[in-house]
Every structure is written in C-alpha cells, then in structure tokens.
Image: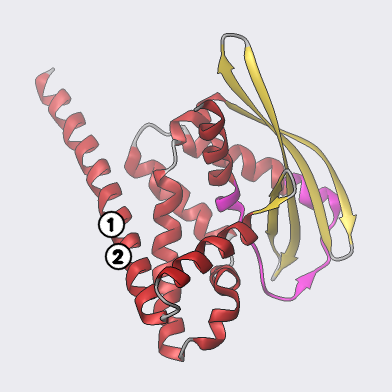
Amino acid sequence: MKSNKILQVIIGLMLIFGTGSVRAQELSEAEALQFASTKGEELLMSFQEPDLAKRYQKLDELFLNYIDIDYVSRFVVGKYWRQMTDEQRVRYRKIFVKYGLSYYKTLPLDYAKKLTYQIKGAEKDGQFVNVSTIVQVDLGEQEKQNVVLIFRLHKTGNIIKAVDVKVAESSLLLAYRSKFYEMIAQSDNEIEWFLEDLGDLAESMARSLDEQAANQQKSLEFEIKSM
C-alpha cells in the first residue's frame, strides 16, 4: 500500500513538469538545475496547501505553464493522431487538457507532505540537460525510501520545460501512450468512441473535484458561523 502511494505521488510530480515541442534552444546545466530546484519546491508547497480551491488553482497554473499540451496530447495517441480529422484533433486537445488538469488532482496529494526533494546533478546531452533528483519519502516508524527521478529538460521559446521524466528507466510519456492505446483498442479503434469515453472520464473527474472543493468551503463556512 505504501509503495502504491509513493508511486502515485511520483506520477503527480511527473505530470507537472511535462514536455516541450517548440524548437529547442541552448540550455545550460546551471539553468536546468535552478529550474528543477525552484519548480520542485513550488510543486511540493502547492501539494501542501490545505485550501483545495487554492491548491487546485496553483497546480493548474503549473500544469498549463510547464507542459506543452500540443506535443503531449499528440504523442500519447501516437499513430492514431493521423487517423483523426482536424475537427477531432481540436476536440481531443480540449478534452486532453481537462483530463490532465483533473487526473493529477485525484492522486493522494496529502501524502506529499512526507516528501523531500533533493537535486543531485545535471548532465548535458546534446540540446538536452538531464537533471537527476532524489525524492525521499518518510514512511513513518523511522522508515524512509528514496526514489530517483531523472528530468530531461530543454529550452523552448526561452521557457524551460521537460521532455520526459524517468523513474527506474520508465518513461512517463510512453506509459501514457500505452494507457491511451489500450483505451482506443477498447473502443474498437473508433476515434469517435474513444473521444466520447475520454470526455466522459474527464468530465466525471472534474465534477468530482469541484464537489470536493465546494464541500470543503461549505464546511469551513459552517465552522466559522459556529464559533
């Protein structure tokens, strides 16, 4: 159970950093290290915000600012992108944004309070810089677990973004491509059916999250009136 929670929180970390698609520019190791340090701390602080509405707003900002939605959404459907009409591509992208913004909020983010984030180093790799980090999880009873994450960064339009994140050589983008391929296969390779299923899933998650934030706000207002 603990291992599953750790993995889920790490997926949340990976989702925030995202990937870029615009023509890459020169990125120095120092810039990459600063980015990973700053955004890592910002992310963990956002996870720990007790007000759900404020937490979700901050996480949305990180998601939208540091993920190249066009590239990610296209990559995860791979070969099926060519099968989509222009109208389907526009609709799919909108659905994907809502899906992405909702999915990571369903993770056990409170568990992130027990995480510490440490930068280990950076290594130039062509136009990319690979930043190695260690996420340490406090499991209680003096038990801790270290997880190595490698962020592959580049600079696009003077903005630093990650092209991939690896955990034990497992790529986030490839994992999501596998998930979406499975969903498309379950839809009998019909793009329209896939879009309907993904849209329903995204709407359901978003509605549930809105209800959670609203219920929390009502509880806080009730407590204030009761004082």
Q: How is the image coloured?
A: secondary structure
- Which residue is painted at 57% across and 68% down in the image? 76
Residue 8 shown left or right of residue 219 in the figure:
right
Q: Quadrant of residue 156?
A: bottom right
x and y percentages locating residue 198 in the rendered image: 38, 67
Residue 200 is marked as 2
**Segment tinted magenta in the rendering:** 14-34
Q: CA distance from mark 2 to mark 1?
A: 6 Å
Residue 178 shown left or right of residue 119 in the figure:
left
Within the magenta stretch, is there residue 52? no
10 Å neighbourhood of mark 1: few (<14), some, or many (≥20)?
Answer: few
Q: Secondary structure at mark 1?
A: helix
Total count of labels: 2
Mark 2 touching mark 1, by CB under 8 A? yes
- The residue under label 1 is 204
The residue lying toward the viewer, choosing from 205 and 121, is: 205
- Which residue is painted at 73% across and 43% down in the image? 168
10 Å neighbourhood of mark 2: few (<14), some, or many (≥20)?
Answer: some
Q: Secondary structure at mark 2?
A: helix
Say what amino acid the circle numbered 2 marks.
Asp
Say what amino acid the circle numbered 1 marks.
Ser
Within the magenta stretch, is there residue 17? yes
x and y percentages locating residue 186 in the rendered image: 42, 68
Residue 227 shown left or right of residue 176 in the figure:
left
